[in-house]
Amino acid sequence: MKKYLKYSLLPALALGVIGVGTASAHGLFWGGAQADPQSFAQAQTQRFQNEADLLGISLDELKNAWAEGKSIKDIAEEKGITQEQLQEKMKTAAQAHMKANLQALVDQGVITQAQADLRLQNMESRMQNGNMMRRHHGFSF
């Protein structure tokens, strides 16, 4: 059961880390308001870079694999990265992304450092429990 839970977390982490730009540019699963072409291109460029960094490959190599219809899972397998390793890389990237976003809110005076620390602690706890998709009162991260 725990193995299935770990693999069910992988898509959530991928959306959170890799697909955030695309989801925000076009609404979650392409159902929201459409972004302008420049915003979409910027979001996709960031997604490509995030995936390339995650896999330890060049941006051109990632784009070529994407054009061939390969998924991040396919590319990882070709590079000898196990699903467990890919999951751990995604988890680490997600944590770094969460910390950076919270720090931006602190830096802009939106929340206090104590609030950011508490939120990060709660998010990491949810991540460990495999409950990243839970939303509370409309807050999604």
Image (cartoon, rainbow, N blue to C red):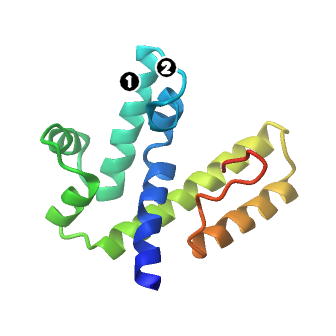
Q: Which mark is residue 34?
A: 2
Q: Residue at x 36, y 56 (%)?
A: 54
Q: Which mark is residue 41?
A: 1
Q: Which mark is residue 122?
A: none
Tell me if mark 1 has few (under 14), some (14-19) or many (20+) residues whose alpha carbon lies within 10 angstroms of its own. some
Q: Is residue 37 above or below residue 22?
A: above
Q: Residue at x 26, y 60 (%)?
A: 73
Which callout, 2 or 1, points at the residue further toward the start of the chain? 2
Residue 66 placement: quadrant: top left
Report whether 33 appears left or right of 90. right
> In terms of secondary structure, where does tag 1 sit?
helix
| Amino acid on which the number 1 mark rests in the picture | Ala
Q: How many marks?
A: 2
Q: Residue at x 35, y 75 (%)?
A: 84
Q: Residue at x 26, y 41 (%)?
A: 59
Q: How far apart in space, not on screen, are marks 2 and 1 (Cα)?
A: 12 Å
The percent position of residue 129, horizontal first and vertical second, equals 60, 75
| Amino acid on which the number 2 mark rests in the picture | Gln
User: Looking at the image, which is closer to me, 123 or 93?
Assistant: 123
Q: Quadrant of the N terminus?
A: bottom left
In front: label 2 or label 1: 2
Tell me if mark 2 has few (under 14), some (14-19) or many (20+) residues whose alpha carbon lies within 10 angstroms of its own. few
Q: Is residue 35 above or below residue 22?
A: above
Report whether 78 appears left or right of 41. left
The percent position of residue 63, horizontal first and vertical second, equals 21, 38
Residue 113 placement: quadrant: bottom right
Q: Is residue 41 above or below residue 107?
A: above
The percent position of residue 87, horizontal first and vertical second, equals 40, 68
